[in-house]
Image (spheres, rainbow, N blue to C red):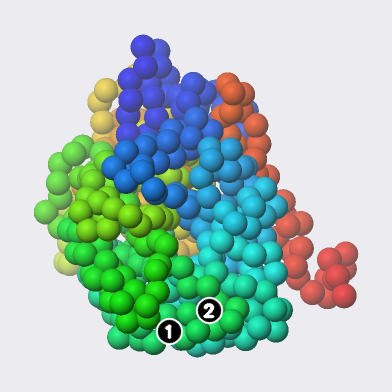
Amino acid sequence: MSVGTRVAEVTGGRLTFDGVDLLDLAQRIPTPFYLYSARRVRWNIESLRNAFTRRHIDTEVFYASKACSLMWFLRQVLASGIDVEVNSGGELWKALQAGFRPDQIVFNGVAKTLEELREGVRVGVRAFIVDSLSELERLAGVASTEQLPARLALRADIDVPARTHPGLVTAHGGKFGLDPDDAVEAFRFAAAHQWLEPQGLHVHLGSQVTTLEPYERGMEAALDLYAEVEAACDLELEYLDAGGGFAVPYKTSTGVEAADAADYFRAPHGLDDYAQVVCGVVERRRPDLRLLVEPGRSIAATSAVLVARVEAEKTKAVRDRSGAKTGEERWLMLDAGYETLLEHRLYEWYFPAVVASRMGVEETARYRLAGPLCDSGDVWIGDDHRGFRELPAGTSVGDVVVFGQAGAYALEMMTPAMARPRAAAFAVEDGAVRRIRCRDSFEDLIANDEHWEGTDRS
Ligand code: PLP
């Protein structure tokens, strides 16, 4: 029988992910590694697409490739029939390499370079999402020089605060988008320009937005601006791009709400709820327009687990200010920390963990989980946002720890900090496990160093 945990499934007492026995895999492959599931990627995309198109049929989904732009992942997205959002020349190149047609690509970013704009114009992307007046002028210059049309949407900061981690807020004081007061002028400029084709309005409220109310307010504000622009510029826009931001739960394993856990860890709403709110406003006010959405996290997060191993353990006294011993803490040192999964540190997301090698053990004990880096901050967030995790009693060196919901903003953000090779990634596809990213070799760590025998490319 298969029973779900928030990490993976339990089949016959073993921890499995899309049918693959994780302990067995960790005995054959050096840890840490990621394991993706093709089925989960497709299922997430299907759920999302259905949630939106059921409520507003004219919805197009653009996967935000910043969440995971591994070539294997992009090809899964392509095969599932949705389009892609890119944020840099590199992501544009990767999307094209993966097989997306230019008209399937929207190009975001706050500081696009001349080269990036030129490349986008030359290949003919579906739309540039223009973030500022200066970028609009720059794009106009590039399109004129190239004598090629540039289709675009303007990104406006509609000033709707979203409940999320402060580092993920995009509107309301954030750096993204035009001031709405400049939107009419910008659309007028674009509409009058020979080579620019303004087609849409873009708003993106933030990432990991755990409440629905910002979407309600955001869609209302966006449609007000949409109508204002159309009237003032005598222009018929084609679409509203609502961005992404649909949250996944990074909260406790126990379900007990910690009093001090911030709201952005909880994600009480599913994709249906987001779709209902976003499409509800569109259907009520402008059922004629096309809706674009750009989800990243909600497609990638649950599509992978991170498999790590305990490399060291210790017990340390806890002392009060006078130095008197008040207790003890048991520490488990893993071979994966923020060099492998940066968001455990950057935003302090809680990634639920299961010890694959102690599945039958019912008794639990408290452990502090640390990564391998020479940095006191490289400690995994505990249950209920406290310092420790309840794990099977006796967990120790050699045990295999599996973190769930690890597929988004993970591979992209790996760093070879302290010369630790970036992890490999594997995928379950059609019942087989295959490697989709190699682990860095030591040679990779110096591949771009100059003036080093054997690596100097000049
Ligand atoms: N679109 C834009 C413009 C973004 O900046 C982001 C990320 O913040 C996304 C889409 C994807 O957001 P998420 O991964 O939270 O769905």
Image quadrant where residue 222 sits: bottom left
Determine which residue is flagged by label 2.
111
Quarter containing the N terminus: top left
Quarter containing the C terminus: bottom right
Please state the horizontal and vertical placement of residue 154, each as a whole percent of the image: 43, 74
At label 1, the amino acid type is: Arg
- Decide: few, some or many residues near mark 2? Use Cα within 10 Å; few <14, some 14-19, many ≥20: some
Residue 90 appears in the figure: no
User: For the residue labelled by badge 1, is the local secondary structure a helix, a strand or a loop?
Assistant: helix
Q: Is mark 1 within 8 Å of ligand 1?
A: no
Q: Give the residue at x 39% y 49%.
A: 59
Mark nearer the viewer, 1 or 2 = 1
Q: Nearer the viewer, residue 421 or 95?
A: 95
Please state the horizontal and vertical placement of residue 73, each as a whole percent of the image: 57, 44
In this rendering, position of residue 202 left or right of residue 410: left
| Ligand 1 - quadrant of the structure image | bottom left
Q: Nearer the viewer, residue 336 or 343?
A: 343
Please state the horizontal and vertical placement of residue 442, each as a whole percent of the image: 72, 55
Image quadrant where residue 330 sits: top left
Vertical position of residue 170 compared to residue 263: above or below: below
Determine which residue is flagged by label 1.
188
Residue 11 appears in the figure: yes
Please state the horizontal and vertical placement of residue 403, each as a whole percent of the image: 41, 40
